[in-house]
Image: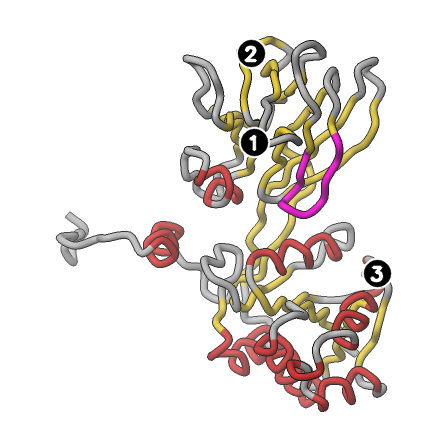
Amino acid sequence: MRRFLLYVHTGRAEALHAMLTVLTEMDRRGVRGVVTDEQVAEIRSADPAIVPPELLEVLDGDRVDIDDRVTAADRVELGIVLGGDGTILRALEVVRDAKIPVHGVNLGHVGFLAESEVAELSETVVRLIEGAYEIEERSTLDVLVFDAEQNELGRHWALNEASLEKADRQKMINVVIEIDDRPVSSFGCDGVLLSTSTGSTAYAFSAGGPVVWPEVDAFLVVPLAAHALFARPLVLGRSSRAAVEVVPDNSDDAVLTLDGRRTVPIEPGMRLEARLSPSSITLARLAPTPFADRLVEKFRLPVVGWRGRDSEGT
């Protein structure tokens, strides 16, 4: 039997009702739903007022598989995510190692990663079951953390950004930026963002970084409130490696945050290294929309006066 993972924003009534709709449609068409045990626990402990009783009956029945993790051996074909970009990022943490494509149904606000809208939910599920979608790959960042003696402490990844920021808002951190094993600049700042093209419309955009089209195989280094004359965002290619060292003297503790979710404490003297990962994540797109159109829609950009090309393309 075919199997689809379902991942939802468990704190929203709209998402839980949508989950029931998706599971019902999948069951009708012979596709078995897979839900993580963590999500099931969150649903069972949620406010009863937002959880449809029929959903609990489905989860307690024998029509849904409940797994503690999803691996390639589980043979899950696709993931359907009901929520905003934050929910999609959580789902990608679950499926990344299994290399499962996900399709996002937007229940959030800006929603650059999500494509479908909840109003078209039944049609979306049918098209996904029929395989009427295209795969879109997105680059991710690999981030290594070293202590002051250059011992590796951990390996991490991010789809949007790795954010190094001061732990105490009343102070600052002093950093040295290194590109391809060469020092480029040092300054005091609130922090430094290491962002993918996908993340260029998220935190990096708010910090003054450029918008980068998703298919561009690049990543950004964006200083946050730097006390320096030269502290502009940098755009690096796949062959490049960026490092950020927290100066041992006259600096304070910091924290590394990955995709706004996972955190790592950073002390003075420690070092981060980032480069584009050889592994990417995949999104299932029903009708890929030009990125320029998505920018206009999500940011409500004015396009008054645009005439475009005539029918002959001149």
Which secondary structure type mostly characterizes the magenta part of the structure? strand
Residue 97 counted in the magenta span: no
Looking at the image, is mark 3 or mark 2 earlier in the sequence? 3
In this picture, residue 60 sits left or right of residue 110: right
Where is residue 153? Give x, y as percent. Answer: 83, 27
Secondary structure at badge 2 equals: strand
Residue 262 counted in the magenta span: yes
Where is residue 223? Give x, y as percent. Answer: 51, 25
Crowd class of label 1 (few under 14; some 14 to 19; many from 20; radius 10 Å): many
Crowd class of label 3 (few under 14; some 14 to 19; many from 20; radius 10 Å): few
Secondary structure at badge 3 equals: loop
The residue that mark 2 highlights is: 186
Residue at the image point whose x is 67% and y is 66% from the top:
79
Q: Residue furthest front?
A: 170
The residue that mark 1 highlights is: 193
Quadrant in which residue 94 is drawn = bottom right
Quadrant in which residue 46 is drawn = bottom right
The range drawn in magenta is 256-265
Q: Which mark is residue 69?
A: 3
Determine whether label 3 and label 1 are within 8 Å by CB. Answer: no
Which mark is nearer the camera, 3 or 1?
Answer: 1
User: Which quarter of the figure is the N terminus placed in?
Assistant: bottom right
